[in-house]
Image (cartoon, grey):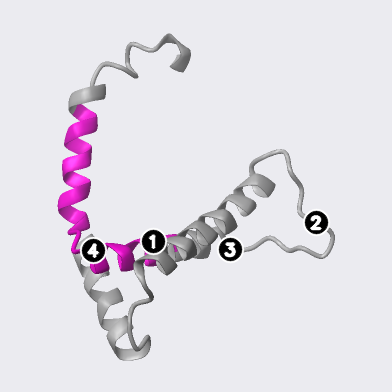
Amino acid sequence: MTIQEAQNTVDQWIKKYGVRYFSELTNMAILTEEVGEMARIIARQYGDQSFKKGESAADLGDEMADVLWVLLCLANQTGINLTEALQKNIDKKTQRDKNRHIDNPKLY
């Protein structure tokens, strides 16, 4: 699935099952919540924290998909074509950082 297909799929789902998009501010709050859930799993699986008693390991992929879902909603709501935005961002990073990381001795 391309990014554009993902944006279209989310839009169709919202129109069929979701009644309407939540407001942009609500979706921003939901995005923050979902990133926090993803961070909790990463902190426990890859960081120094352990899972709390009774807390089970959640599905990191599912949490990442939740983050992507809400990001796609926000893109649709604000008229952002994420395919174009991502390509523009890659071009910017390539121009700005093409030698920055290669020349960084900390990375070797």
Q: Provide the residue designation for mark 2.
A: 52
Task: Please say whether residue 7 is visible from this viewpoint.
Answer: yes
Q: Is residue 11 above or below residue 74?
A: below
Question: How far apart are labels 1 and 2 at the CA level?
Answer: 26 Å
Residue 68 on the magenta span: yes
Circle nearer the viewer, 2 or 4? 4
Q: Residue at x 32, y 16 (%)?
A: 102
Question: How far apart are labels 2 and 3 at the CA level?
Answer: 16 Å
Circle nearer the viewer, 4 or 1? 4
Q: Is residue 45 above or below residue 107?
A: below
On the image, the x and y values in percent for residue 60 come to 55, 58
On the image, the x and y values in percent for residue 87 come to 17, 45
Q: Provide the residue designation for mark 1.
A: 68
Q: Provide the residue designation for mark 3.
A: 59
The mark that comes first in sequence, 2 or 3, is 2
Q: Provide the residue designation for mark 4.
A: 78
Question: How far apart are labels 4 and 3 at the CA level?
Answer: 29 Å
Do the CB atoms of the residues marked 2 and 4 lie less than 8 Å apart? no
Q: Which residues are magenta?
A: 67-94
Q: Quadrant of residue 96?
A: top left
Q: Is residue 54 above or below residue 14?
A: above
The mark that comes first in sequence, 4 or 3, is 3
- Callout 4 amino acid: Thr
Q: Residue at x 21, y 29 (%)?
A: 94
